[in-house]
Image (cartoon, helix red, strand yellow):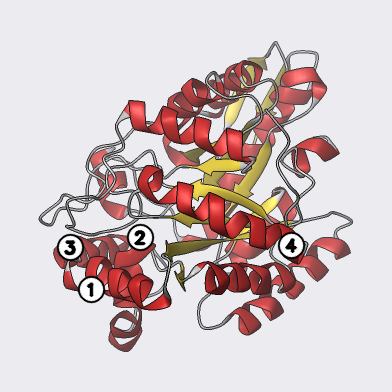
Amino acid sequence: MTADRAELYSASALKLGIFGANMSSGIAATKVPERWSAAWEDNVALARMLDAAGLEFMLPVARWKGFGGATNFEGAGFETVTWACGLLGETRRLTVFGTVHAPLVHPIFAAKQFVTVDHVGRGRFGLNLVCGWNQDEFEMFNERQRDHETRYVYGAEWLRVIRMMWECDEPFDFTGEFITLHGVEAAPKPYRGTQPLIMNAGSSDTGKAFAIANCAYLLSTIRNSVAEAAENVGDAHRRAAALGKRLGVMTTASVVCRPTRREAEDYYRYYADEQADWDAVEHMVDAGTRGSSTTMQPEHYRRMRVRFAAGYGGWPVVGDPDTVAAEFVAIARAGFSGIAMGFVNYLAELPYFRDEVLPRLERAGVRVPATPA
């Protein structure tokens, strides 16, 4: 991995990207008619718009079946590595991630697939690694989820095989706790001898430790406040430094930006509460907790339910351009290096964000102006 890759080929301190555009409804479990369709033509138009604006990345959701409800939330969508390959061919500087469930893909196939896409994108492919989550999907594959601790042990072994294939010039055998391989060889290697960025969204102590030890980026949710999150980010940076490595920490946000704060708050209430697909939200929460080591307490769900509908519980950033920009600056100053953003309709809402919020972030010193692509 080179410094350019680690910085997502950008000089901006706060990297910005889009989360979930490969799935119908994006990350918003809402019934509003203007919700995201995830049509391929719209994904291409969005990727080109991001590329021209100088935003850094697109991060997809790996989903194999919908969450039901009136909209069958995320019931239609694209497999993420193939999706990334197509979008990398349509852009010049955008980093596009693939999101992959390690237990569902053999590491030999995965390593070759990732290298192929990395060459298509000339070093702009990234991997968002998932070790387990949605119990319904694992049942669809007839695969058993390992217990919470063991799934990360497996993930580390899976990733070790991937990296050996990227690095070893001679055939090798591998015997691990879970994986046994014979006479493995792999060519070509990733683009120009570098390696794709790897991200993980571990939130438990075990998950965070895995991400800090094995990945370039930790994707971490802001739960209660940006100030509280700053402590968690600082802890992740200290733990990474103790391992002699640098770590980037990103978060997710549900963004509504309108000319006035009142308009933004009204729309957030409309799509994430009044028009929320509550059956889908409850199914999503249930599927996740059944595949987790913890059970969500009822009071936590009641407190977070609108945020779950708005975008997987991501931090709500709602207001006029000054308010949105100020919140993004606060997130950057809390130590986060990037934000994966969700909008109800990415193509419809991104131009206003680009024209009004990006210049404010540049004036605040957390973004630099985009150069022509």
| Residue picked out by circle 1 | 273
Residues marked 3 and 4 touching at CB (< 8 Å): no
Q: Give whichever of discs 4 and 1 has the lower sequence position.
A: 1
> What residue sits 35% from the left and 32% below the top?
42
Q: Nearer the viewer, mark 1 or mark 2?
A: 1
Q: Which residue corresponds to mark 2?
A: 291
Q: Secondary structure at mark 2?
A: loop
Q: Are marks 1 and 2 in contact (CB under 8 Å)?
A: no
**Label 1 near label 3: C-beta < 8 Å?**
no
Q: Which mark, residue 363? A: 4
| Label 3, label 2: how far apart the Cα atoms are | 22 Å
- The amino acid sitting under disc 2 is Gly
Quadrant location, the C terminus: top right
Q: Please, what secondary structure does the residue beneath circle 1 have?
A: helix
Inspect the image, locate mark 4, and give the three-letter code of the amino acid beneath it: Arg
Residue farthest toward the bottom in the current orientation of the protein: 299
Q: Secondary structure at mark 3?
A: loop
The residue at 27%/61% (across/down) is 284
Q: Is residue 151 visible from the viewing direction of this image?
A: no
Compared across the picture, whether 140 is left or right of 373 comes to left
Task: Please provide percent x and percent y for residue 232.
Answer: 67, 76
Residue under the image location 47 percent in, 53 percent down: 352
Res 362 visible: yes
* Relative depth, front residue between 234 and 137: 234
From this view, report whether residue 292 is shown above or below residue 213: below
Q: Amino acid at mark 3?
A: Asp
